[in-house]
Image (cartoon, rainbow, N blue to C red):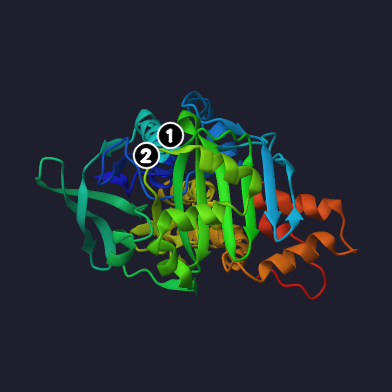
């Protein structure tokens, strides 16, 4: 029997497994794919995520992969410029845009080096129950054999469409409907030393330098216009990038080196993230529109919170169920302000007026604009924004 089985080995599951293995627990890490492999997902690691990579001893490996440090921000929100150096957090003032073929492999390797047992190409077919308590998993291994593994706790880190969450019928709350259609691709021949973010005319454009001297360019449209966007995908994409003058010329002169990847499957919700014998982390526990690209950093944060709770429960400091209640409460307190701001921005309309007032209101000053800049890169908690009287960012 294992202490913990973690289902899903990407940016929430592997850190959870790594941290628990480092504490001496017997951990089994499962994933339906093999690594390295790609996934349809954002891959910007904002400042708090970089802080954790550094704390875990993995930042040097990320740097060695060819992901350049991003230390400048170029933001235009409805005519409001928030450009300049990225604010620091715990002495680190950079972000990294890391291809998921690279980042996830680094995280998986770190979990294995810490002592976790890894089973790749393992498909979990069902959870095992003793009464209402989850006690393990049944699945198919890489050779096609039917395999059972048991544990004191099963962690679902298996993403937005979590099979673990479905099996335990985890309750949804705080739900908001999908707001955007999001699409990205990679370009060569584009020189970029900063994160570019541009919101105008109900369109969002973002660009980041990434591995292999490439630049990832993403756009977002209102979800109601997804059909018209897809009808002529490349033309729609380039016309959106044309909103950003300095970037548009380079993108049109550069070379797209990967197919477009797009989705409108971007719901906003929280799930109840614990129950008898189970817990959820990462996108399995809560999901939001990728507009502000905080998903990876949030997954890292929640992996730490969950590992601390599991350690507290399994070590006997408190009942495991009580520890997991505390995990969900801490996760929600940390996540909710950013969740609300992100959801509002994802509407791609009215928030520009609100943000304009936030940085232009005569009762505010440059420090408030700097604070907003910090929020956009994750260096400042969204709850620290101080909107003018009568202005609601949520």
Q: In which quarter of the image is residue 164?
A: bottom left
Residue 230 in percent (x, y) is at 40, 62
Left or right placement of residue 129 versus residue 352 in this view: left
Could you say whether the residue bearing mark 2 is in a helix, strand or loop? loop
Q: In which quarter of the image is the N terminus?
A: top left
**Residue 38 in view of the camera:** yes
Could you say whether the residue bearing mark 1 is in a helix, strand or loop? helix
139 or 365: nearer the viewer: 365
Q: Which residue is drawn at 47% across and 58% down?
A: 236
Q: Residue at x 58, y 58 (%)?
A: 204
- Which residue is situated farthest in the bottom direction here? 390
Quickly name the residue at label 1: 22
Quickly name the residue at label 2: 25
Left or right placement of residue 362 versus residue 54 in this view: right
Label 2 crowd (10 A; few <14 / some 14-19 / many >=20): many
Label 1 crowd (10 A; few <14 / some 14-19 / many >=20): some
Label 1 – label 2 distance at C-alpha = 7 Å
262 or 284: nearer the viewer: 262
Q: In which quarter of the image is residue 383?
A: bottom right
Verify CB contact (< 8 Å) between mark 1 and mark 2: no
User: From what the image shows, is residue 337 above or below residue 313?
Assistant: below
Residue 169 in percent (x, y) is at 32, 70
Residue 50 in percent (x, y) is at 57, 37
351 or 318: nearer the viewer: 351
Residue 126 in percent (x, y) is at 20, 59
**Residue 378 in view of the camera:** no
- Which residue is situated farthest in the right direction here? 362
Q: Which mark is residue 105?
A: none
Q: Which residue is drawn at 51% across and 50% down?
A: 218
């Amino acid at each position: 029997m294992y202490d913990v089985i973690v289902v899903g080995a990407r940016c929430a599951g592997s850190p959870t497994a790594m941290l628990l293995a480092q504490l001496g627990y017997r951990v089994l890490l499962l994933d339906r794919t093999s690594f390295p492999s790609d996934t349809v997902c954002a891959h910007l690691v904002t400042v708090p995520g970089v802080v954790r990579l550094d704390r875990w001893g993995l930042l040097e490996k990320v740097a060695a992969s060819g992901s350049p440090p991003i230390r400048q921000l170029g933001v235009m929100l409805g005519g409001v410029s928030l450009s300049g150096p990225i604010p620091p957090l715990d002495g680190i003032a950079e972000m990294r845009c890391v291809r998921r073929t690279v980042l996830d492999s680094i995280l998986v390797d770190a979990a294995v080096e810490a002592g976790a047992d890894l089973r790749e190409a393992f498909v979990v077919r069902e959870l095992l129950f003793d009464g209402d308590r989850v006690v393990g998993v049944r699945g198919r291994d890489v050779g096609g054999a039917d395999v059972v593994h048991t544990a004191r706790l099963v962690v679902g880190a298996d993403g937005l469409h979590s099979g673990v969450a479905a099996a335990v019928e985890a309750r949804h709350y705080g739900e908001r409907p999908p707001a955007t259609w999001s699409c990205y691709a990679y370009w060569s021949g584009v020189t970029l030393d900063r994160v570019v973010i541009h919101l105008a005319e109900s369109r969002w454009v973002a660009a980041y330098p990434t591995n292999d001297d490439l630049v990832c360019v993403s756009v977002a449209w209102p979800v109601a216009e997804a059909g018209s966007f897809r009808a002529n995908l490349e033309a729609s994409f380039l016309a959106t990038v044309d909103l950003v003058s300095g970037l548009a010329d380079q993108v049109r002169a550069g070379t797209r080196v990967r197919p477009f990847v797009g989705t409108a499957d971007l719901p906003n919700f929280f799930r109840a993230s614990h129950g008898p014998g189970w817990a959820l982390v990462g996108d399995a526990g809560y999901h939001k529109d990728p507009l502000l690209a905080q998903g990876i950093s949030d997954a890292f944060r929640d992996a730490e919170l969950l590992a601390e709770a599991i350690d507290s429960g399994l070590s006997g400091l408190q009942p495991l169920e009580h520890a997991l209640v505390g995990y969900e409460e801490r996760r929600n307190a940390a996540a909710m302000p950013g969740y609300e701001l992100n959801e509002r921005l994802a509407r791609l309309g009215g928030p520009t007026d609100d943000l304009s007032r936030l940085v232009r209101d005569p009762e505010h000053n440059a420090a408030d604009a700097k604070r907003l800049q910090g929020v956009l890169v994750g260096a400042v908690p969204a709850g620290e924004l101080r909107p003018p009287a009568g202005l609601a960012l949520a």
